[in-house]
């Protein structure tokens, strides 16, 4: 029996989604205590420029999963400035297969030259807990009930297009994290709090959840209709 606090499933976005909106801030916004993996012995073998391996880290055992984000920071000659962020496509033991965010496998410039690369510094931090909390909040707002039968009307599996909730979840997480980090007076974070508050308000106002396999099994749910029903 686990003492881990209960978390909602499914969730409506991933670390990769948040990276696309947060850019270089992603590394700061992910708390260090939510680290899934870290090392400086990363290797890209010759002929495998998308597959990062580590003798010291078992990524699978650590719970690293697809759509999380790896931050590559060394060698600096290959990953200058603030380093490179890549999405995780697949995990197998001591290796992870990477890809460019929002691109298919093998699309774009590989992170390693064809001849291979050693001494790669990497870290994988996640915002999974914040994503779960934001997803649960949206379920409460729109009366989504995942405790009922998975095929029941108003469960997540009965939503016609889950993507309508993705942006709202991303903005919710970013607003929460930027708000937390403004206490450290990090540059323009205070302005970003206001920016994402406006973006979240706008996203919530536009959300229209359609139900069933054809989107017409029940009246669409909006923030306004749920408020009225309560």
Image: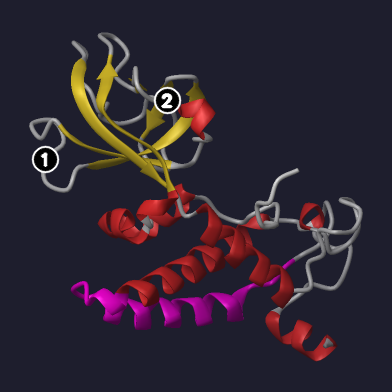
Any mark on residue 137, and which? Answer: none
Q: Quadrant of residue 79?
A: top left
Residue 101 in the magenta stretch? The answer is: no
Q: Is residue 189 visible?
A: no
Please identify the quadrant where the N terminus is shown: top right
Q: Are marks 2 and 1 in contact (CB under 8 Å)?
A: no
Picture residue at 64% right of the left edge, 54% below the top: 11
Closest to the observer, 59 or 104: 59
Identify which residue is drawn at 70% across, 57% down: 6
Query: How busy is the neighbourhood of tag 2: few (under 14 within 10 Å), some, or many (20 plus)?
Result: many
Residue 190 in the image: above or below residue 85: below
The residue that disc 2 covers is 96
Few, some or many residues within 10 Å of mark 1 (<14, 14–19, 20+): few
Is 97 placed left or right of 7 in the picture? left
Q: Which residue lies furthest to the bottom in this view?
A: 228
Residue 25 as seen in the image, left or right of residue 202: left
Q: Helix, strand or loop at disc 2?
A: strand
Above/below status of 43 relative to 78 = above
The answer to whether any part of residue 130 appears in the image is yes
* Residue 200 magenta-highlighted: yes
- Magenta extent: 182-209
Q: Is mark 1 on a helix, strand or loop?
A: loop
Image coords of residue 71 (percent x, y): 30, 41
Determine the image quadrant of residue 104. Answer: top left
Location of mark 1 (residue): 80
Residue 36, by quadrant, is: top left
Above or below, 8 relative to 39: below
Instruction: Classify residue 164 as left or right of residue 54.
Output: right
Q: Nearer the viewer, residue 201 or 5?
A: 5
**Residue 67: % across, % down:** 49, 41
């Amino acid at each position: 029996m686990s003492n881990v606090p209960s978390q909602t499933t499914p969730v409506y976005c991933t670390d990769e989604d948040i990276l696309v909106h947060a850019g270089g801030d992603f590394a700061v916004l992910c708390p260090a205590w939510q680290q899934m993996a870290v090392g400086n012995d990363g290797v890209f073998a010759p002929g495998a420029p998308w597959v990062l391996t580590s003798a010291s880290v078992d990524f699978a055992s650590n719970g690293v999963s697809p759509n999380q984000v790896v931050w590559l920071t060394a060698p600096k000659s290959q990953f200058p400035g603030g380093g490179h962020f890549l999405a995780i496509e697949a995990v197998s033991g001591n290796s992870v297969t990477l890809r460019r965010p929002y691109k298919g496998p093998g699309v774009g410039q590989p992170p390693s030259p064809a001849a291979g690369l050693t001494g790669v510094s990497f870290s994988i931090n996640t915002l999974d807990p914040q994503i779960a909390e934001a997803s649960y909040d949206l379920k409460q707002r729109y009366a989504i009930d995942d405790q009922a039968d998975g095929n029941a009307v108003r469960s997540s599996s009965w939503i016609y297009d889950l993507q309508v909730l993705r942006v709202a979840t991303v903005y919710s997480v970013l607003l929460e994290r930027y708000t937390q980090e403004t206490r450290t007076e990090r540059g323009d974070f205070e302005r970003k709090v206001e920016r994402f508050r406006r973006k979240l308000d706008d996203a919530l106002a536009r959300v229209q959840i359609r139900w069933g396999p054809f989107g017409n099994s029940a009246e669409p749910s909006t923030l306004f209709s749920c408020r009225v029903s309560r």
